[in-house]
Image (cartoon, grey):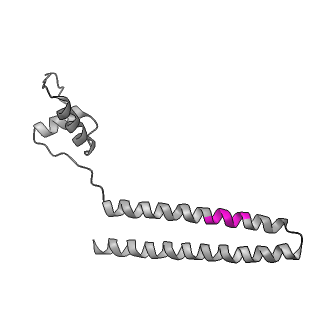
Amino acid sequence: MRKTKEVRKIFFKIRVNNSELEQLKKQKQQSTERSLSNYVRKVALQKPVIIRYRNQSADDSLKQMMELKKELNAVGNNFNQAVHKLHLLSTIPEFRSWIRDYEMLHQAVDQKVQNINSKMIQLYEQWLQK
């Protein structure tokens, strides 16, 4: 059997000042309710309101990972440019200088990968403790 939805035909009006309205809007934003009227209705009728929860440590970790990703992308771009230059080399002295540059770039990439690995291990250990 279908459940009939009761039509809300009674208009209930309340007055609030600007600060109260802003407070209600801020609280509604922290919930999963889509409209302010539904949020206020649930609060007034003492029905449960689902509040979104943000994990601050996960947010901080994500920010760190994004910074590491940017750094790794920059190193990867440098590496791609170096390989492209290798294809354009025509003499042995140019090749030797490229090898020196490549070695420095390889060390930078290796250091960033180790840094990412240690951060991932730290994240994993944090989440195991919860």
* 34 displayed left or right of 70: left
Residue 46 at x, y = what percent? Answer: 10, 42
Residue 55 or residue 33, whichever sits in front: 55
The residue lying toward the viewer, choosing from 3 and 121, is: 121
Q: Position of residue 1 (x, y in %)?
A: 21, 37
What range of the chain is rendered magenta? 75-81
Image quarter where the C terminus lies is: bottom left
The count of marks equals 0
> Residue at coordinates 21% horizontally, 35% vertically from top-left?
38
In depth, the one of 36 and 23 nearer the eye is: 23
Taking the spot 67% from the left edge, 64% from the top edge, the residue there is: 78
Which of the 4 image quarters holds residue 57? bottom left
Q: Can residue 4 be seen in this view?
A: no
Residue 49 in the image: state x and y as whole percent.
Answer: 19, 45
Can residue 117 be seen at all in this image of the molecule?
Answer: yes
Looking at the image, which residue is at 85% across and 68% down? 89
Residue 76 among magenta residues: yes
Q: Which residue lies furthest to the right in this view?
A: 91
Up the image or down, 117 lies above or below 42; here it is: below
